[in-house]
Image (tube, rainbow, N blue to C red):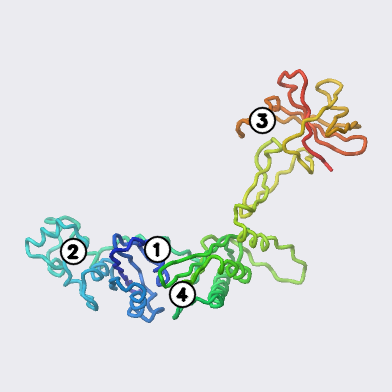
Amino acid sequence: MQKRRFLSLACAGRDDLANLALWCQAFTPLTALDPPDGVMLDITGCAHLFGGEAGLMARLAARLPNARMAVADTAAAAWGLARYGKPGSPDILLLPLAALRLAPEPIARLRRIGIRTIGQLARLPRAGLVAGYGQAPALRLAQALGEAPEVIRFITAPPEWREAEPFMEPLWLPAQLQAALTKLAARLCARLTAATLGATALTARFYRVDRACPAIHLAFAAPCRDEAQIAKLLIEKLAQEIDPGFGIEAVALEAPLTEPLALVQQDMSAKPPDYARPLNTLLNRLGSTRIWRVAPHASHIPEFATERVTVKARPVAWPKPHHPRPLRLLNPPVLITAIAPVPDDPPVQFTWDGKTHRLRWATGPERIARDWWAHPHDPTRPEAEKIRDYYQVEDMEAARFWLFRAGLHEGVAVPRWYLHGLFA
């Protein structure tokens, strides 16, 4: 099992530790805020990518000339060495008690009996130390020596589906960054293909030498692992959203959201059209809030039976209607004048937009009661519309319409008639 190694950065006077911790992910995926003045890095298995621990520290020192840093087997020891140790000395036993992150009160009490360094504290019996000075000194000592675990709250860890590329020399030319994105897209898509997954969102992060970390975010209408399409969308946004500044020393491409995407047999038969490709382009050019599709909504009222959803929402099967529905729905319904032999009979003619339509047949009624509990009150709609009687009618010219009568069941003297849809 590989021994863990921690690097502590002490940057006095910085007020942007969150940005610094994110920038440090160019060197290791595990970084944590260490307030009030530092960042903790778990560099286990990462240092060889930068020429060993000395090479990694040299690169950090070039970007953070005023920072103090140290590497140790435990986070507590790295913290103490970075703030109280001598450069190049890994011995924590020579450090003062303050290097254990103890409060002033136990330090003062220990100094009264001549305990001034961690080495002197380590020679005391642990049971007596706990009995005389509480749990804190013994616990901090054990954490520094690797005898007790320490919880480190790393910032949001990179997703499992992540590919990163560090560079020996910072990049700033568009062609260089485009090549890096194309390479990372190919590597990430190969892994997604092997796992039969597709990305529904992608983020490309650019780690600049000035510790800024701009990013490009992509959204997809359906799971995607097409490396050519992904590279094209990233490159399209590169010039618009990314300023390389004085150079970019690492690029990472990660898929925070994935969904299953089965492998498709490649053959010579005709393929169905792929609507996801143009939708992906529109999504990332116009934004997800400006593109939508229609989905069914649980409501008996025809104008409320559909809703707008994002194109990324999972498709829902449309329910089969119990009665025929018109191809074109008028919203809101149009008030018309209709004639019926008796109030509760189908109409025999109606007038719409100045034209009278004589009817040769009508079917109905289909009674629909308004689901008032599911929709807020609309003062523009008359209360008489709470119960509707719908009729399919056809005029002498074979044009078919969808009419409804409202008000008959609410005691209205003259019921109102509305045209709600056209069948052709």
Viewport quadrant of the N terminus: bottom left
Q: Give the residue at mark 3.
A: 380
- Viewer-side label of 3, 2: 3
Please identify the quarter of the rendering in which residue 235 is found: bottom right
| Residue 245 x %, y % | 46, 71
Instruction: Name which residue lies at 43% across and 63% down.
Output: 157
- Viewer-side label of 1, 2: 1
Task: Provide the secondary structure element on which disc 4 rests.
Answer: loop
Q: Are marks 1 and 3 in contact (CB under 8 Å)?
A: no
Amino acid type at circle 1 is Asn
Instruction: Name which residue lies at 33% across and 60% down.
Output: 15
Please identify the quarter of the rendering in which residue 226 is found: bottom right
Please identify the quarter of the rendering in which residue 381 is found: top right
User: What distance separates the C-alpha of mark 1 from that of mark 3?
Assistant: 52 Å
Amino acid type at circle 2 is Ala
- Viewer-side label of 2, 4: 4
Q: Give the residue at mark 4.
A: 247
Could you classify mark 1 by the number of other residues whose Cα lies within 10 Å: few (under 14), some (14-19), or many (20 or more)?
A: few
Task: Provide the secondary structure element on which disc 3 rests.
Answer: loop
Q: Give the residue at mark 2.
A: 98
Q: Give the residue at mark 1.
A: 19
| Residue 295 x %, y % | 67, 47
Labels 1 and 2: the sequence-earlier one: 1
In the rendered structure, the answer to whether residue 54 lies left or right of residue 252 reads: left
